[in-house]
Image (tube, grey):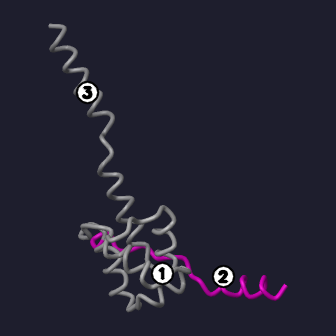
């Protein structure tokens, strides 16, 4: 019973991550840069974030320095641990920009079919 109460007390102390300004999100070039920027702007130490995430400091350091791949669960946990949503926003923007525009692709294929048929 005490563990449950302590768990809920800890959850109440955690605030949802705040979104980063759009200007900052556009300037970030990589997930590595997003993590470093978040840590610098919030004055967080590596050990503090690793402790909040429940991983070792060396594991977090390897992920930040691109020596280990970023697991799927990592961005959300990092954002909650730092209180800033910059990493997730960068990843979402990168994914959105990498997806091909279906309408443009369909139009290009239709024009090619017309050209071939003519």
Query: Mark 2, residues whose alpha carbon is within 10 Å: few (<14), some, or many (≥20)?
Result: few
Between marks 1 and 3, how big is the CA–CA gap? 43 Å
Q: Judge whether 75 appears above or below 61 on screen.
A: above
Between marks 1 and 2, how big is the CA–CA gap? 13 Å
Mark 1 or 3: the one toward you: 1
Which residue was labeled with disc 2? 11
Q: Please tell me whether the stretch drawn in magenta is mainly helix, strand or loop.
A: helix
Label 1 vs 3, first from the N-terminus: 1
The residue located at (25%, 23%) in the rendering is: 109
Q: Judge whether 91 appears above or below 59 on screen.
A: above
Between marks 3 and 2, how big is the CA–CA gap? 50 Å
Query: Mark 1, residues whose alpha carbon is within 10 Å: few (<14), some, or many (≥20)?
Result: some
Query: Mark 3, residues whose alpha carbon is within 10 Å: few (<14), some, or many (≥20)?
Result: few
Residue 65 place in picture, x, y as percent: 31, 75
Residue 101 place in picture, x, y as percent: 30, 39
Residue 43 place in picture, x, y as percent: 38, 92
The residue located at (49%, 83%) in the rendering is: 56
Which residue was labeled with disc 3? 107
Which residue was labeled with disc 1? 83
The residue located at (39%, 59%) in the rendering is: 92
Q: Quadrant of residue 116?
A: top left
Label 3 vs 2, first from the N-terminus: 2
Left or right relative to 1: residue 102:
left
Q: Magenta residues, as a range?
A: 1-24
Q: Residue furthest right?
A: 1
Q: Circle 3 — which element?
A: helix
Q: Quadrant of residue 57?
A: bottom left
- Residue 2 shown in magenta: yes
Q: Are marks 1 and 3 in contact (CB under 8 Å)?
A: no
Q: Circle 1 — which element?
A: loop
Residue 17 place in picture, x, y as percent: 49, 76
Left or right relative to 29: residue 12:
right
């Amino acid at each position: 019973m005490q563990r449950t109460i302590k768990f809920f007390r800890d959850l109440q102390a955690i605030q949802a991550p705040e979104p980063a300004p759009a200007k900052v999100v556009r300037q970030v070039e990589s997930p590595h840069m997003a993590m470093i920027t978040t840590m610098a702007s919030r004055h967080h130490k590596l050990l503090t974030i690793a402790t909040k995430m429940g991983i070792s400091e060396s594991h977090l350091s390897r992920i930040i320095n691109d020596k280990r791949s970023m697991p799927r669960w990592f961005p959300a946990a990092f954002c909650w641990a730092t209180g800033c949503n910059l990493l997730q926003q960068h990843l979402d923007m990168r994914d959105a920009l990498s997806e091909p525009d279906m309408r443009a692709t369909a139009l290009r294929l239709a024009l090619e079919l017309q050209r071939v048929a003519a």
